[in-house]
Image: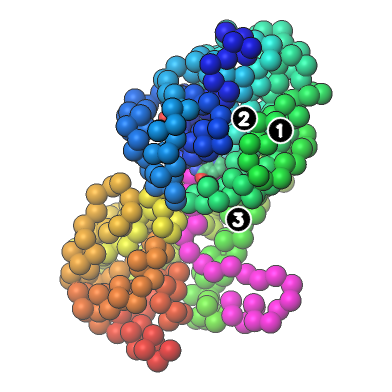
Amino acid sequence: MTPEQSTAEVSVVGLGRVGLPLALSFADRGLTVTGIDNDPARLSAVGEGRMPFAETGAQELLERVHGSGRLSLSERVADAAHARYVVITLGTPSFSHIEIDMRDIRSALDDLLGVLAPGHCVILRSTVAPGTTDFVAGYLAKHRDFDIGEDVFVAHAPERIAAGRFLEEIDTLPCIIGGVGRRSGDVAAELFAAFAAPIVQTTPVQAELAKIWTNILRYTHFALPNLLMMDCERCCANVFEVIDLINHDYPRGGIAQPGLTAGTCLRKDFAFSEERSAAPGMLLAVSRVNESVPLFLLEGAKRRIGALADRKVAVLGLAFKADTDDERDSLAHKLIRLLERELADVCAHDPHVPTPTVSLGEALDGAEAVIVATDHSEFRDPRTLAAIGERAGGDCLVVDPWNCWGAAQVFAYSSELAALVASG
Ligand SMILES: NC(=O)c1ccc[n+]([C@@H]2O[C@H](COP(=O)([O-])OP(=O)(O)OC[C@H]3O[C@@H](n4cnc5c(N)ncnc54)[C@H](O)[C@@H]3O)[C@@H](O)[C@H]2O)c1
C-alpha cells in the first residue's frame, strides 16, 4: 500500500508508556491512528478501553478515543505502512556491554522493509544511541534503494516527557526533530504540528544527543546528593543540613536532594553515550554512585541495629519514582534482593505497582527497620510516620533518604523522628 492509499494517517509501533499516550493523543487531535503492539494482552486491554498502566488522564483519554473510532489496533508491524507516518516507540534497552540493544528496532525495520513506499515518513521516537537515526536511514537506503529525505523520510523526534505528565507536556515541551536529508525534518514536523508544543529542528545526531544528555543531566544531578549522603555518613555529618547550607541564598544553582535514583530511562541512557565516549568512565562513576545507594542504606541500618538475619524489614515503595506504578529498573527491587541476601525477613508495601504487596499495617507489624524506597505521596503523609510508631514501635529504625516528614534524618528511630516532627 502506498501512502496515497492510506487507511490511517499515523501508525504508532509499540504501545508502551511512550507509544500508547502518543497514539491516543494523535487520535484525540483528530488523526486516524493505527496502534501496533506484539503483546496480545496489551492489545486486548486497549481494545476494551482499559489503560494497561497508570498515566495521568490517560484512562479518560482512552475512553474518549475509543468512542471516536479513530484508533485501530494491529499486532503486525507491517500494518504500520497503512499510514503515511510510522512512529516507532519500541523499547531500546542496553546490553550489559555498555551498548544499545536495537533488536526490537531492527526487527521492526525488517518487517517494514517490504512495505515502505515513496512518501512514507519513519520517525524514531524511542531513545537511541548517537548515529542510530542515520543507521535507520542507511538501512532503508541499502535494502530498498530509497533516496532518504527525497522520496522516503526518516527523522528522530525524541520523547522527553516525564511519566505522569504526558498529557500536559505533549503541548508544552519543545519537540526536537532531527531529519535525515533535505526534507525529512519538515515532513516529520508537519505531523507533530498536531500538538501545540514548539518544534525545534536540528540534525539527527544532535537530536539524539539532546535526548540522552537530558537524561544524563538528571542522572548526574541526583548522583551528587547521593554521593554527598554517603560522605556525610562517613564524616558524621547531616546531609540535609549540608544541603541547606549549600543552597541557602546561594545565587548560582543548587544541589538536589538524595534518594534512590533509577528507572529504565535514567539507568540505560548514559550507556548510549558512554558506548563511544572519548572519556570513558565519568558517567559509569555516576551510575555506580546511584546504584550503590541501596547497599549504603542497608549497611547504615546494620551499623545501627546489627545483623539483619531473621529480622523483619519493611520496604515502603517498589516503584522507581514517586506516584508511578512503573517498577522497571527500580532500586527498590535491588534493595530487597540485598536484604534477602542478609537473610532478613522482607515485607514490601506499595499502593501503586502491579506486583502484589502486603498492606501497610501488615508490612509494619513487628518490623525492626522500615526503609522508604519510594517517596510516594502516601508515605509523605504524617499518618504513615504515626503508623510506623503504632505498628512497629518507637525503637524501629526508619531509613528515609527522601526526608519524607521533614525530620532531616536518613537513619533515625521512629520515636526520634516523631519527636523531631512534633517539635517542627
Ligand atoms: N517510559 C518513559 O517514561 C520514556 C520516556 C522517554 C523516552 N522513553 C523511550 O521510549 C522508548 C519506549 O519506551 P517505553 O517505556 O514506552 O517502552 P515499553 O516497553 O513500555 O513499550 C514498548 C512496547 O513495544 C512493544 N513491542 C516490543 N517489541 C515489539 C515488536 N517487535 N513489535 C510490536 N510491538 C513490540 C511492547 O509490547 C511494549 O508494549 C524507549 O526507547 C525508551 O527509552 C521512555
Mark 3 to mark 1 CA distance (whole Å) = 27 Å
Residue in front for this viewpoint, 165 or 25: 25
Instruction: Indicate the amino acid at tag 3.
Output: Arg
* Residue 190: % across, % down: 70, 31
Q: Residues within 10 Å of mark 2 (few under 14, many from 20)?
A: many
Per the rendering, the mark at residue 218 is 3
* Residues rendered magenta in the picture: 243-272
* Residue 207: % across, % down: 71, 38
Question: Which callout, 3 or 1, points at the residue further toward the start of the chain?
Answer: 1
Q: Which residue is mark 1?
A: 189
Which residue is at a point 32% across and 28% down the rendered structure image? 44
User: In which image quadrant can residue 313 be found?
Assistant: bottom left
Please say whether residue 255 is one of the residues in the magenta stretch.
Answer: yes
Q: Residues within 10 Å of mark 1 (few under 14, many from 20)?
A: many
Question: Which callout, 1 or 2, points at the residue further toward the start of the chain?
Answer: 2
Residue in front for this viewpoint, 363 or 343: 363
Q: Which residue is mark 2?
A: 124
User: CB under 8 Å between callouts 3 and 1?
Assistant: no
Rendered-image quadrant of the C terminus: bottom left
